[in-house]
Amino acid sequence: MLPAERHRAILQHLHARGSIRVKELSQLFDVTEETVRRDLHMLEEEGKLRRSHGGAVRVDEDMTNEISYLIRESEHVPEKEVIAKTALQFIGIGDRIILDASTTALHLANVLPDMPLTVLTNSLKVALELSGKEKIEVISTGGILRSSSLSYVGPMAEDSLSKFHVNKAFLSCKGIHTLHGFTESNALQALVKRKMIDIADTVIVLADHSKIQVQDFTHVADAREVDMLITDSETNEADLTAFEQLGLRVLRAD
């Protein structure tokens, strides 16, 4: 196992359990305890955990326990990839679109062809991913950079968004529910996504099955404010029908 893969696995265990001991990690990964201590030291330097006597504990950045980008990047990857490829059919030459700071939007940025297009984003990683595509104009919102999501939030980001108008917004979420709507785990992220919805003609939510009929901490928008939901084949038919009854166009990517 490569160090980067081991680091991701350590963070996944910490997210699930809250704490873990050096000896357990040594046995789990079949490496020396000294190697584990070096791993923990590096992750602590990056602010991703806090070392404790004999192990490490999870760092909860705020009351909502937002999962770090490193962990989210490794979750439901095949589903996010197929959702991103399905979303491509709704992007045309000359469009002006928003991509948020979700890992699913990053997958969409990755598969976007190099064509005349304007992309407005609050994601540092999306901006970097698109920087090598010469025909795509990338506009970053700026603002306060959140290390846990590598995204810009706060009044500067919201004010920047308010100066634009886009054809389509491609957003993901922590949960989308027929009754409770589009929700996020962090209030600052929710305010930015609310502004993204306000300036878009069409709102397209990219959500794998783990986010369907889930309610998280902060309300962003009612489900009826979403025009289209693209999800994966694991989402059950009854949930798709429930969203369609609210007026959403629903696509299940295969």
Image (tube, rainbow, N blue to C red):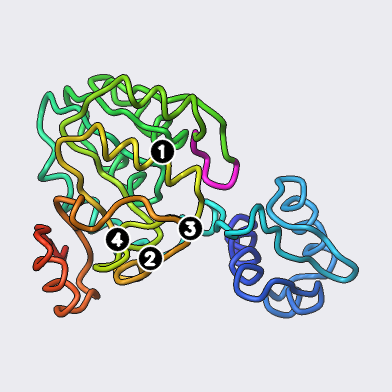
In the rendered structure, the answer to whether residue 161 lies left or right of residue 38 reads left
Instruction: Give the Cα distance between marks 1 and 3.
Output: 19 Å
Instruction: Give the Cα distance between marks 4 and 3.
Output: 21 Å
Question: What main secondary structure does the magenta stretch of the protein show?
Answer: loop
Foreground of the two, 17 or 200: 200
Instruction: Give the Cα distance between marks 3 and 2.
Output: 8 Å
In this picture, is 42 found above or below 181? Answer: above
Label 4 vs label 3, nearer the camera: 4
In this picture, is 189 found above or below 20? Answer: above
Where, by quadrant of the figure, is residue 129 drawn?
top left
In the rendered structure, the answer to whether residue 53 lies left or right of residue 113 reads right
Counting residues from the start of the chain, the first of labels 1 and 3 encountered is: 3
Mark 4: amino acid: Gly
Q: Which residues are magenta?
A: 147-152
Mark 3: amino acid: Arg
Mark 2: amino acid: His
Residue found at the far right of this picture: 53
Instruction: Give the Cα distance between marks 4 and 1.
Output: 16 Å
User: Tags 2 and 4 in contact by the CB under 8 Å rule?
Assistant: no
Which residue occupies 10% across, 27% down? 93
In this picture, is 179 found above or below 121? Answer: below
Indicate the position of residue 57 as horizontal and vertical percent values.
Answer: 76, 66
Residue 192 badge: 1
